Image (tube, helix red, strand yellow):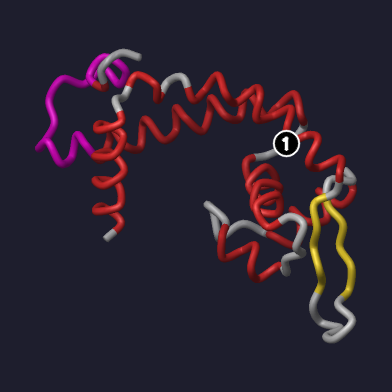
């Protein structure tokens, strides 16, 4: 990838902080688009993929919608609609709780685990971009991003 200046055709910035903010936004969008292209053949959105990964992480234990929402990368997503779409694709199952009729137990299905395995093999190529960072650089990048979020 070329420098930010070349990518957005701008050579001067108000400050290094302004440039860093633009660079972060540009790079996040670049990464999002790369992942979108990889998810497209699987007919999944980022949010659907995120929910499948969350459910895989708790597997074999069930989760409820509130717990899924708390772990999502984009917590403003319409989780109810995403869950309905994943149920229709047979990647997750939803069962009403025995002890509370307002709560539902959500589980990843074998088909959901299978599609994740396929996707993870495909997305492994994207991780190679991060191989250009040393362990120390990745650690510092993570620390800086954490610091920005305060």
Q: For the N terminus, give its image quadrant.
A: top left
Please report the residue visible at 27 percent of the width from the left and 36 percent of the height from the top.
Answer: 22
Q: For the C terminus, give its image quadrant.
A: bottom left
In the picture provided, is 34 more to the left or to the right than 13? right
Which residue is situated farthest in the bottom direction here? 99
How many dots with numbers?
Answer: 1
Q: Which residues are magenta?
A: 5-20
In the picture provided, is 34 more to the left or to the right than 57? left
Please report the residue visible at 51 percent of the width from the left and 33 percent of the height from the top.
Answer: 32
Q: Is residue 34 above or below residue 47?
A: above
Q: Is residue 33 above or below residue 110?
A: above
Which residue is situated farthest in the left direction here? 15
Q: Which x, y percent locates residue 80?
A: 75, 62
Task: State the residue position of label 1.
Answer: 116
Q: Secondary structure at mark 1?
A: helix
Residue 64: image quadrant is bottom right
Q: Nearer the viewer, residue 139 or 44?
A: 139
Q: Is-magenta flag for residue 17?
A: yes
Mark 1 is surrounded, within 10 Å at the Cα level, by few (under 14), some (14 to 19) or many (20 or more) other residues, namely some
Please report the residue visible at 78 percent of the width from the left and 34 percent of the height from the top.
Answer: 115
Q: Is residue 20 above or below residue 123?
A: below
Q: Which x, y percent locates residue 78?
A: 67, 59
Q: Which x, y percent locates residue 24?
A: 31, 37
Residue 7: image quadrant is top left
Q: Which x, y percent locates residue 55?
A: 70, 54
Please report the residue visible at 86 percent of the width from the left and 43 percent of the height from the top.
Answer: 110
Q: Nearer the viewer, residue 94 or 1?
A: 94
Residue 35: image quadrant is top right
Q: Is-magenta flag for residue 128?
A: no
């Amino acid at each position: 990838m070329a420098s930010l200046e070349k990518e957005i055709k701008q050579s001067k910035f108000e400050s290094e902080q302004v440039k860093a903010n633009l660079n972060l936004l540009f790079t996040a969008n670049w990464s999002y688009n790369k992942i979108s292209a990889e998810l497209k053949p699987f007919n999944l959105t980022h949010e659907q993929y995120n929910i499948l990964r969350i459910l895989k992480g708790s597997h074999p234990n069930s989760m409820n919608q509130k717990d899924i929402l708390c772990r999502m990368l984009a917590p403003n997503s319409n989780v109810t609609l995403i869950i309905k779409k994943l149920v229709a694709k047979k990647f997750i199952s939803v069962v009403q709780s025995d002890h509370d009729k307002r709560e539902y137990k959500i589980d990843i299905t074998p088909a959901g685990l299978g599609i994740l395995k396929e996707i993870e093999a495909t997305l492994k190529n994207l991780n190679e971009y991060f191989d250009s960072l040393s362990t120390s650089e990745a650690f510092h990048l993570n620390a800086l991003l954490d610091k920005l979020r305060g």
